[in-house]
Amino acid sequence: MEEKIVILGNGFDLRHFLPTSYNHLISILCEIEKLPEAKKSISFSDLFDGVFKEKNEWFYNQINEYYQTENFIFDLEEIKSIQNRLGENSWFQYFKSVDENKIETWIDFETEIERILLSVLEYFESFNKSEFKKPRYAGLNGNPVFFVPIALEKEFFKNKLQISLLKFFGLFHEDGHNLNVFEKFILNIGNEIQYYKERDFLNFIYISLENFVGIFNDYIISVINVFYKNLRREKMENFTVKDDHFIFEKTNQVFSFNYTSTLVNFYSSKVKARQLEGIIGSQYQPIHGLAKNDWGSNLENLTIVLGVDDINNSLKKHKLFQFTKYFQKLHKRTDYLFLDSYKEKIRKYDGRRITFYFWGHSLDYSDRQYIKEIFDLVSTINGCKIKIFYHSISAKGDQLKNLLGIIEKEKIEKFMKDKTIEFIESTSENLFKEL
């Protein structure tokens, strides 16, 4: 008997033509930000006919083909709530300004978080070592002001990127011909900056990131969830159902890296009808949390994990663990144990073959912990296999390159030679056949 365990990535949502890529999110948030204040209702065209259509025309057409977009009605209050938060969120304002060719995927997004932190710390270290001039002092209406003349900024900073980041994230703000320091982040003695309150500023940045997570959470709830109710019935045939069979019919367990509830919304009634049961009695487990409808504007209630996989020694020295996924998984109590909770149960199925499927997952280095766990398990249990779905030849090449960056090439070669690993094109026919 064969047990089938599926690991889902963002490609699963994209296969259902849900706008869940990084660039999709930024495009729609830009449209939300500029909605007229007097707007009384928000339709599909209000959010999707501008920047989104321009940059994603094929995807836009597919959405219209598969969904009843004429019936889309977005909750005005919820969208306005998102809009009100966008203007003051440093992370959104920064990412909106970055060239889209520089940040294309969620992996790029994670990499950029680390780059921002390193640049900020580099400024603090340079200041502490007096490698650049210190901001000047001036008394303004009896209040102390520390500033950098914009015309002389090269004498105070490493480069324009560093200046831009420190402005976006609120250490400096532009005031005429000067960049003024926010006084709450410095210790001023004798009209001279003694030091920056680095921990306070970095915590300020983290809270801003969590607020961005709240915006992202509400984007899923207010925008993505509208799609679930409007899938065209005729499109379900050969898409989720084929000849009275449905994808996941033969699946025992699903782990998802997605924050959406696509599996539950498009497949749950069929899953219940067949009474499928996972190895540990719970068929669907989100790894990085799910978007919540009822978080009550309390950041502590959010469960979405959005950060870097790990931090280098420079960041560890400053204890910036709150920006990492492993800290957030522990703090937000998501499923940080992954396979640990039932490895022994799997081993008890001596006569069963276990096949792990990756669907819509890039196999990127940022998820190496989970990928290694699966490979370790497959290496120790006879009859286990790994099958990786790919949507194009170039995507297959990228997945293989990513895998070689995580697992030793000798093991990959051996697994491919004895067909322990198999790459399968994610055609509708293959998905129904395998899952």
Image (cartoon, rainbow, N blue to C red):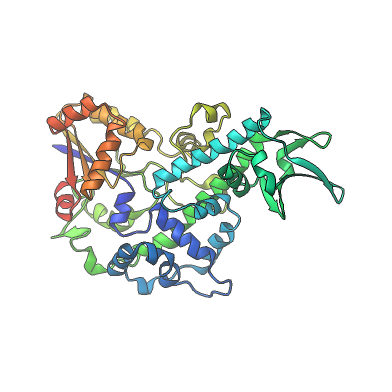
Question: Going by the image, does 76 lie left or right of 141?
Answer: left
Q: Residue at x 64, y 34 (%)?
A: 124
Q: Viewer-proximal residue, 59 or 330?
A: 59
Residue 2 versus residue 151 in the image, above or below = above
Q: Is residue 38 above or below residue 173?
A: below
Note whether residue 293 is visible. Answer: no
The image quadrant that residue 245 belongs to is bottom left
- Residue 385 point in image, percent of width and height: 18, 34
Number of residue marks: 0
Q: Is residue 95 left or right of residue 290?
A: right
Percent across and percent down for residue 359 are 26, 46
Q: Nearer the viewer, residue 397 or 294?
A: 397
In this rendering, position of residue 266 left or right of residue 35 = left
Residue 368 seen by the camera: yes
Which sits in the foreground, 93 or 374?
A: 93
The residue under the point 18% across, 53% down is: 427
Q: Quadrant of the N terminus?
A: top left
